[in-house]
Amino acid sequence: MTTTSDAPARRTAPPPLPPEERARLARAFSVPRTRFLVGLPLAAAVLLWSMGGAEFNFVKLGEGSVNMAEFLSRLFPPDFSKLGIIVELLVETLQMAIVGTVLGAVLSLLVAFAAASNIAPRWLYYPARWAMNVIRSVPDLVFALMFVSAVGLGPFAGILAMTLGSLGSIGKVFAEAMEAVDRGPIVAMQAVGASRRQVVQYGVLPQAAPLLVSYTLLLFEGNVRGATILGLVGAGGIGLELTTAMRMYDYGHLSAITICIIVLVTVIDQGSALIRRRIT
């Protein structure tokens, strides 16, 4: 006859692992395969070759640490006497990033439909992929210079550059997120005669939506940082003021701008992380 004190112990006792499950867990910690052992020295050789070609030198880095420390010491104390101008330009940078992200995400989503192998036909898939490769290979500063010459100096040129640049990067990520969805619901819908639009609307987008939102937030964070660079060529934002401070050796003003950018990016990063936790 069993006692009541033994019952909880029996209920909480874990069941024994089946032999096949135990073997699977043991394989997870097995010795790496031969191709991994061959690939590791090859990867190390490529890394050393790249470091030599790029003149990467730890000794030179150590010798230059004194100059870096001297440069950082010039940034203190920061000068916030022009805080009003900094805040105004940061707001403009944020506005550029918001508009550029919305336009870029919408256009990237449309292009992603054509660049996802499980949605688009072959005659549309390859041209869409090639177009994104071409756009991704061109730096955003080149796009900014092109649009500055087309529409003039100002944030509008920066927004157009961010929008076009997004097609190459985030469009590819959107397409790969759609390709990674579970094929089961798609096959089931196709078996009952669902149209391509219904497959995308009810089979692909609901599964890919969390990733699409997360990548859009990542695009927004990148556009905020990118807008500070586009200002270097006159495409609006805080970048022009940052460049002016560097050229004038106004280190106090430069430090204040940098601190404000860090605060803005940190706030956006925390807000994006909060939204990601809510949708995942």
Image: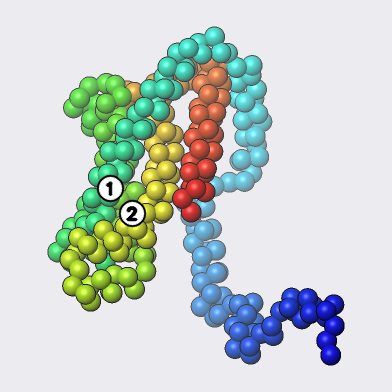
Q: For residue 236, say whether it is visible.
A: yes
Q: Residue at x 37, y 69 (%)?
A: 182
**Residue 134 visible in this rendered orientation of the protein:** no
Q: Which mark is residue 82?
A: none
Secondary element at image label 2: helix
Instruction: Locate residue 41, reporting x and y percent.
Output: 55, 69
Q: Looking at the picture, tell me which residue is in the foreground, 163 or 146.
A: 163
Report the disc number at residue 174.
2
Question: In 3D space, how far apart are the residues under numbered discs 1 and 2 (Cα atoms)?
Answer: 7 Å
Point 37% across, 54% down: residue:
209
**Mark 2 residue type:** Phe
| Image marks 1 and 2: residues in contact by CB distance under 8 Å | yes
In this rendering, position of residue 175 left or right of residue 245: left
Horizontal side of residue 258 vs 22, given as left or right: left
Compared to 184, does 128 lie above or below?
A: above
Residue type highlighted by circle 1: Ser
Taking depth in this image into account, of 102 and 176 the one nearest to the observer is 102
Q: Which residue is mark 1?
A: 108
Query: Residue 31's quadrant in the figure?
Result: bottom right
Earlier-in-chain disc, 1 versus 2: 1
